[in-house]
Image (cartoon, rainbow, N blue to C red):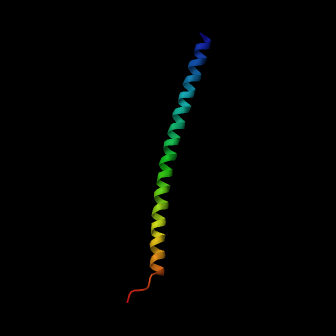
Amino acid sequence: MRTVLWIVGIVGGALVLLGLLLEAVRWLVLIGAVALVVVIVLAFVRGRQLLRRHSPGRR
């Protein structure tokens, strides 16, 4: 009976840790996606600034 309680406790603890890990992975994926969008937007803005700077001025 005591062994069963240990097994149930270990399995329960493992499930809690797995749940926390999956929650952390979900947040990391969300943060990574936001960072990727920010990098793409900044690259687009910088590219437009460089094109404006090197293109001949309008008269």
Up/down of 1 relative to 8, above or below: above
Furthest-bottom residue in this view: 59
Which corner quadrant of the image does residue 18 belong to? top right
In this view, the residue farthest toward the left is 59
Q: Residue at x 58, y 15 (%)?
A: 5
Residue positioned 45% across, 63% down in the render:
41
Q: Is residue 53 above or below residue 17?
A: below
Quarter of the image containing the N terminus?
Answer: top right
Picture coordinates of residue 59, whole percent (x, y): 37, 90
Q: Nearer the viewer, residue 46 or 22?
A: 46
Percent coordinates x, y for residue 7 in the rendering: 59, 18
Using the image, determine if residue 53 lies above or below residue 46: below
Q: Residue furthest top?
A: 1
User: Residue 52 vs residue 8: left or right?
Assistant: left
Q: How many marks?
A: 0
Residue at 53 percent of width and 28 percent of height: 15
Q: Residue 16 at what x, y percent from top left?
A: 53, 30
- At a point 61% along the width and 17% down the height, the residue shown is 6
Q: Nearer the viewer, residue 53 or 10?
A: 53
Quadrant of res 48: bottom left
